[in-house]
Amino acid sequence: MIPVSEYVSRRQKLFDHLEDGSLAIIFSGVAKKMSYDDDYPFEVNRNFYYLTGIEQEDSVLLLLSSEGERKEFLLVSPFDPVKEKWYGKRLTPEEARELSGVRNVLLNNALNARVDSALRGSFGDFGDIKTVYLDLEKENKIAESTSTNEYKQSLETAYPGVTVKDIYPIITRQRLIKSAAEIAEFEKAVAHTRLGIQSVMALARPGITEYELADQFLHTINDDSGFQGLSFNTIMAGGRHATTLHYPLPRGVISRGECVLMDLGARHSYYCADVSRTIPVSGKFNDYQRMVYEIVLGCNKAVASFAKPGITLLELQNFAKEYLAGECLSKGIITRKEDIAKYYYHSISHQIGLDTHDPGGDKSLPLAPGMIISDEPGLYIAEANFGCRIEDDLLITDGGCRVLTSSIIKEVADIEAFYAHRK
């Protein structure tokens, strides 16, 4: 688990980027409406969670920086015996203090008064607060019908001398470099994912449905992780369905001779594994499938060898595209290098962390030690009813990278041996 001292350190690092005479207001968020009388399951704002370790809705972090002083406040929901009968126990101020390391824990009904006193200059020994930082990520809900962008408008109306700035890019850039504790949590997510993939491979056979395999993965990783859930909705695509990158509804029946492309991941403490594997349900690749698979696998390995500090995701993309084009040209899959766009039409890599596609980095940002990125080449050949993607998660190190998902088999010989020995 992430130690409390790390949450304290993250907040202090964030303070270093805040202007003197500023107030940061960061909300945990609320559940979003799904239908007439039901909400989607609550998912905490990852930036709030990153700074506090608190995953409870209706919570707020206040960071005050003024005249060389720094002060933190955490606001949580008050005890409500009726709500607790319906929705379960809420954190007490003492529990929130222990989890987050924030010493000043208040009830969230004090938020408006705290913000008002800070912005009107009556907040204890602090001077004028002229800047407010909000997490202005789109659709960041802080009440049933209020987003942080709408809250921004209300602050600007009530306090015309205050400038509101977006803290989202500051926090997400900080999130890109993972600590040793974060990497350990990520490796647990990978371990759950490995077991889930093994269970899918053990179950896969001609005539099975895509949703049976997707369900198998979900049940296995939840049993192993203590119901921590999926990194994202599982993609389980057989045959021609595998040529649709984000194939949405796994309802198809997988026929003899077809392959299944799975893109999936388990999470642990919200850290998201993201893995793709392609397997033959009959136990062996045919000659054409093996040829295409080996091209993709070769690219996967080459990208891992190429990734290192200073390289950008854009450079990785160009490297992968050139590799795939050259191999496909030599094997007669395409007749011109530029035709690779017909069979490879996505990016080779993205940042991974508390979100499967971790924000904070663009394609031109140089990689640095501590970043975790994907390595996911693929070829999608609709006329052959075959799509292949092999995705690993790479930890950038001082001298290159480490493949965090190396324990999940991907060699043709290993996959076929697994099926040969399956009971």
Image (spheres, grey):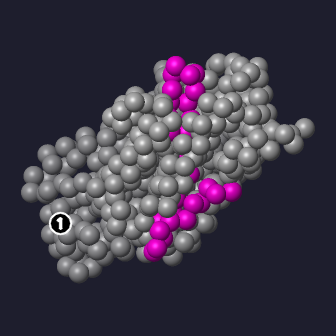
**Considering the numbered disc 1 on the image, is that residue within a helix, a strand or a loop?**
loop
Q: Is residue 45 above or below residue 344?
A: below
Task: Residue 2: name its quadrant.
Answer: bottom right
Residue 106 seen: no
User: Image quadrant for the C terminus?
Assistant: top right
Residue 143 in the image: state x and y as whole percent.
38, 40
Q: Kindly identify the amino acid type of the residue bearing the numbered disc 1.
A: Ile
Residue 218 seen: yes
Instruction: Look at 73% across and 30% down and name the residue there.
Output: 281
Relative depth, front residue between 140 and 123:
140
Instruction: Look at 70% across and 33% down and name the residue there.
Output: 285
Q: Is residue 251 left or right of residue 151?
A: right
Q: Is residue 112 left or right of residue 157?
A: right
Q: Which residues are magenta?
A: 378-407
Instruction: Look at 42% across and 66% down and name the residue there.
Output: 308
Residue 135 in the image: state x and y as whole percent.
31, 52
Magenta segment: does it hold 403? yes
Q: Is residue 145 above or below residue 407?
A: above
Task: Residue 216: name its quadrant.
Answer: top right
Total residue callouts? 1
- The residue singled out by tag 1 in the image is 129
